[in-house]
Image: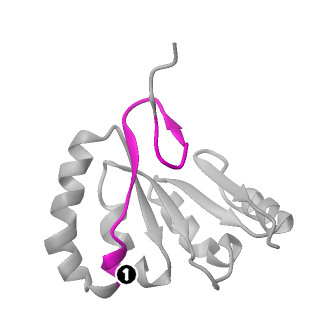
Amino acid sequence: YYPGDCNVLTEWAPGKTYPVQCDFSVMISPEQFKRFVVPEMDAIGQYLDYFYWHLDGPDEIKHLDTILSKDYVKVVQWVPVAGKPDALYWIDLLKKIQDAGKSIMCYCDNYDNAIAISEILKPEGLWIRYAKSA
């Protein structure tokens, strides 16, 4: 028996977990994010043991400092969105997430980029998905 939880993306955690997101946040200011999104995050954060935030593209980066300030956020899943470079291009963003004490989920389009990221970032809490582009 292995207690824990799997979410829709099949990541396992030793407690309740789920990828939390608000894609609408790309259309609102950081102040509006704090007013309308953070209260919901706080409520979900009280329920989940392993809360992770799905950071969906460059237009959502403006909310990263608020997201990183929440102790209940354990992981940030960085998805650069279609047409944008893979995780290696965003290495400074990934370092910022790691420096805030959060784990990272990120995606690479090629093997060399995945290896480069694994050599730049700390291995603890680092999840890299490598999927060769067609």
How far across and how far down the image is residue 8, in percent? Answer: 48, 47
How far across and how far down the image is residue 54, in percent? Answer: 44, 62
Q: Is residue 17 above or below residue 103?
A: above
Towards the viewer: 16 or 124: 16
The answer to whether residue 67 is left or right of residue 120 is left
How far across and how far down the image is residue 72, in percent? Answer: 31, 48
Residue plotted at (31% across, 78% down): 25
The answer to whether residue 102 is left or right of residue 69 is right
Residue 69 image-quadrant placement: bottom left
Q: Residues within 10 Å of mark 1 (few under 14, many from 20)?
A: some
Residue 117 image-quadrant placement: bottom right
Q: How many marks?
A: 1
Badge 1 element: helix
Towards the viewer: 62 or 44: 44
Residue plotted at (54% across, 43% down): 11
Boundaries of the magenta span: 6-26
Q: Is residue 32 above or below residue 5?
A: below
Residue 34 within the magenta-colored segment of the rendering: no
Towards the viewer: 34 or 11: 11
Quadrant where the C terminus is found in the figure: bottom right
Q: Tell me, what colour scheme is on the image? A: one colour
The answer to whether residue 114 is left or right of residue 30 is right
How far across and how far down the image is residue 105, in percent? Answer: 57, 56
Residue plotted at (45% across, 68% down): 55
Residue 12 within the magenta-colored segment of the rendering: yes
Tell me the residue that label 1 is attached to: 62
Extreme residue in the right direction: 112
Q: Three-letter amino acid code at disc 1?
A: Lys
